[in-house]
Image (spheres, rainbow, N blue to C red):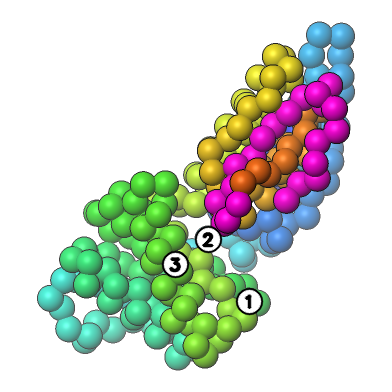
Amino acid sequence: MMKEFEGRTEQEAIAKAIEELHIEREDFDVEIVEPVRKGLFKKSNVKIRIHFDEDNNGMDSDIYESRPGDGEDIAFPVNSVLEHDVLVFVATMLQKMGYEGKVTISFRKERKLGLNIESENSSIIIGRKGKNLDAIQLLANVFVGKTEPDLKIVVDSENYRMRHEEQLIRMAFKSAEQVRKSGRSRLLEPMNPYERRLVHTALTDFGGVETKSEGEGLYKQIRITSQRDGNAPAMQ
């Protein structure tokens, strides 16, 4: 299938496609229909056409339910022992936390398995800035890593990760625009490596600014600088 999207940059248009179609970047090809055209006072948007397989768009039906106090007699369809085990593992975590919810298989890739949590307590399960969701995902990966170390588990709820990525990209564009206008650098909040790569990539083609990572440890900060400030260190 084909569909067209627009954005101020190619990355912004791609982010819109990912959000609307609920598919991952590696699942579609991008064709530039209309590149950026710079005018006297402003520049036009980028228009892209994406090509994707409709079969990859949507949610799978595998479900495991968690209810505090319930036993393990709930029937659910599974495609493998590993999927069964990780569904039970995450559902059991929710049960131990005291929350009702459904854990579903949201997507399957060659080395990646997506889980989605549906719950009336999603805001608590997600946590501030996704910290609780990240903790659940980390434990799920440790559990799966004992038998399948090359398989990555991605845990989401209420499409939080997609919304968070879109928010990061919007914030990056807004901050970059402020830097370009003022000439003064801006230091963004601490981010994990994946979030930093997302921001660096989003601003690659944003004219007039450069990005670099600062700090030590896992959570570093990105500084956006004006190109007139001189050469910035390479991305990290």
Disc on the earlier residue, 1 or 3: 1
Measuring from the top left, give residue 77's x and y in whole percent: 39, 82
Residue 16 to residue 217: above or below: above
Three-letter amino acid code of the residue under disc 3:
Gln
Residue 9: percent from left, percent from top = 75, 33
> Which comes sooner in the sequence, label 2 or label 1?
2
Please indicate, yes or no, whether residue 4 appears anywhere in the rendered image: no
In the image, what residue type sits under mark 2? Gly
Asked whether residue 199 appears in the rendered view, the answer is yes
Please give the residue where the numbered disc 1 appears in the rendered image.
Answer: 111
Q: Residue 58 bears which disc, if any?
A: 2
Q: Does residue 118 appear to the left or right of 208 in the view shown?
A: left
User: Marks 2 and 3, Cα distance to the nearest angstrom?
Assistant: 21 Å
Locate residue 155, reporting x and y percent: 45, 64
Q: Give the range drawn in magenta.
A: 216-236
Q: What element carries label 1?
A: loop
Question: In terms of image quadrants, where is residue 169?
Answer: top right
